[in-house]
Image (spheres, grey):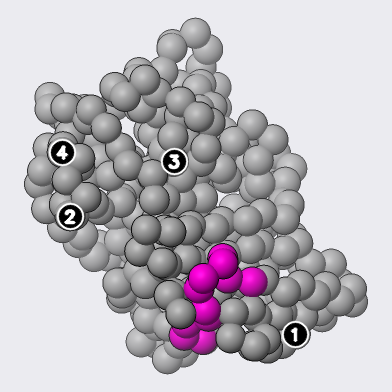
Amino acid sequence: MTRIRNRAALTAIPLAVAALAVGAASSSANSTQWGDNGSGTCNAWQSILNPSQSGTELGTYCMQSVTGWISIGGGASQSQAISCSNNAPGGSPGLSWSLDGQAYVNNPQWYEVALQNTTTDDPGSAKYPFIGWQTGDGDADLSSESWDGLGSAGNASTGSYGSWGASVTNWGGSGQWQTALACINLGGGGLSQSARVHRGAGSSIAPVRIADKKIDTIDKAKGRAFLAREYVVKKNVTRADTRSCPAGMVRRGNLAYTVQEFPADNKAPKWKNRSLVDVKMTPKGKNAGSVKMTLKRAKNPTVVQFQMRCGKR
């Protein structure tokens, strides 16, 4: 896992995530640290800077990376890996998806995960990402769970994008949810403010770009790995893949997947109109797992995220 150095601008305040009720017209809607299309994750991080940068224009220091809408059944628990590369130039699903019409300061280099309690290089110190989620149409009633994957901080100097994840349990009926991760630019080891050379605006009608993507985090020192890969699926086309743990590791826990949709208007799909994907997951030996996916129905661009965890033999 990438270590972060020289963050004198951060304070060591423990992360406290509060559940906020939103959308008074819909009793099932709920969210955590969401704000406007996930920008609440960035504002939460900016508020602990010294001095506080709460309310600073989006993109000055931070940009949220937003996933697609994820379908979840009643009584289910799910995890979703999120990469800062979502907002990379030419990335998938692209910056316009995360912005959804918000104005911002234009700086595309949000490589690193915004972390809290990282003022020292002590490897034993807690490091908390800024993650939010919200529910969409349907009867989903979510609560946050502990993320059981791994996180990668990313590094602006080397051009590597960080990633983390969110986990939830649905205590209600079926519905949709999406999650966001605060991403920042700490190139050169210090807090970098975006150059105010151009102002842009997000567009909710820009074409949604989706592409295959790996979101892997490997901690060789501790003999752990979290492997996630996203696959673009097309109607009635079967895709298959096998993923293997790094050398010296074996598969741990169950294989898992999620189905994401990316509507052009950024709004949650109706449950009755959700993408239907036939997914079959199969353990292979002790250190691998395979997945086979066939999209049966879809009104929106659809991605399957396949997940596998690994540990020491």
Identity of the amino acid at label 4? Thr
User: Looking at the picture, does residue 45 appear above or below residue 67?
Assistant: above
The residue located at (38%, 44%) in the rendering is 2
Mark 4 crowdedness (10 Å alpha carbons): few <14, some 14-19, many ≥20: some
Task: Say which of 309 and 47 sits in front.
Answer: 309
Q: Tell me if label 2 and label 4 are in contact, CB under 8 Å.
A: no
Q: Residue 150: x percent and y percent?
A: 40, 62
SS majority, magenta:
strand
User: Regarding mark 2 in the picture, which secondary structure is present there?
Assistant: loop
User: Regarding mark 4 in the picture, which secondary structure is present there?
Assistant: loop
Pointer 1 or 4: first along the chain: 4
Pointer 1 or 3: first along the chain: 3
Q: Residue 260: x percent and y percent?
A: 62, 66
The residue indicated by pointer 1 is: 278
Pointer 2 or 3: first along the chain: 2
User: Regarding mark 1 in the picture, which secondary structure is present there?
Assistant: strand
Query: Is there any visible trace of residue 166 in the rendered image?
Result: no
Task: Say which of 168 and 139 sits in front.
Answer: 168
In-image side of 164 versus 21 (left or right): right
Q: Give the Cα separation between the discs numbered 1 and 4.
A: 46 Å
Identity of the amino acid at label 2? Gly
Q: Give the Cα separation between the discs numbered 2 and 3.
A: 18 Å
Q: Which mark is residue 120?
A: 4
Q: Residue 215: x percent and y percent?
A: 56, 56
